[in-house]
């Protein structure tokens, strides 16, 4: 699934039950209900997990976790996430929810994009 990188963490973590039906890895991006965020450490299915949820957190996503470009992953555009596939996209589609605003497209120089996470997933 989608492993991401956060450069500047703070302590805005909520502890909720892993209801996704599978074990999760640390640094994995997930959406549970309307909460979206980054799993702080590996968590078994059904166990309590720590989720980094701070809004406007800048998150890096590698090209391997991106769906094919629809809008060029342009800065300022909306970023969407599909929990079932673990892929991010720059256009809405079936199963995708809006999770943030694209901050930088660095696909040419370093195969990543960065985005600012919305407070809640919108779908």
Image (cartoon, rainbow, N blue to C red):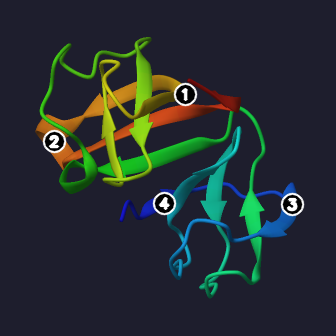
Determine whether label 2 and label 1 are within 8 Å by CB.
no
Cα gap from disc 2 to disc 3, whole angstroms: 34 Å
Residue denoted by label 4: 5
Q: Secondary structure at mark 2?
A: helix
- Residue 60 lies left or right of residue 66; in this view the side is right
Q: Nearer the viewer, residue 19 or 6?
A: 19
Element at label 4 = strand
- Residue 69 position, x and y percent, is 15, 26
Q: Which quadrant does the N terminus fall into?
A: bottom left
Instruction: State which tag comes first along the sequence, 3 or 4.
Output: 4
Residue 109 circle label: 2
Neighbourhood count class around disc 4 (C-alpha, 10 Å): few under 14, some 14–19, many 20 upward: some
Q: Position of residue 24 (x, y in %)?
A: 53, 77
Mark 3 vs mark 1, CA separation in Å = 19 Å
Residue at which label 1 appears:
100
Classify residue 80 as left or right of residue 46.
left
Q: Nearer the viewer, mark 2 or mark 1?
A: 1
């Amino acid at each position: 699934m989608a492993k991401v990188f956060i450069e500047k963490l703070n302590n805005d973590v909520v502890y909720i039950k892993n209801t996704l039906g599978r074990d999760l890895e640390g640094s994995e991006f997930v959406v549970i209900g309307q909460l979206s965020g980054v799993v702080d450490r590996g968590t078994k299915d059904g166990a309590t997990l720590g989720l980094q949820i701070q809004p406007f957190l800048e998150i890096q996503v590698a090209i391997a976790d991106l769906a094919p470009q629809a809008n060029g992953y342009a800065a300022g555009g909306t970023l969407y996430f599909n929990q079932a596939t673990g892929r991010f996209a720059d256009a809405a589609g079936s199963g995708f929810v809006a999770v943030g605003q694209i901050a930088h497209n660095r696909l040419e120089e370093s195969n990543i994009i960065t985005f600012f996470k919305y407070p809640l997933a919108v779908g």
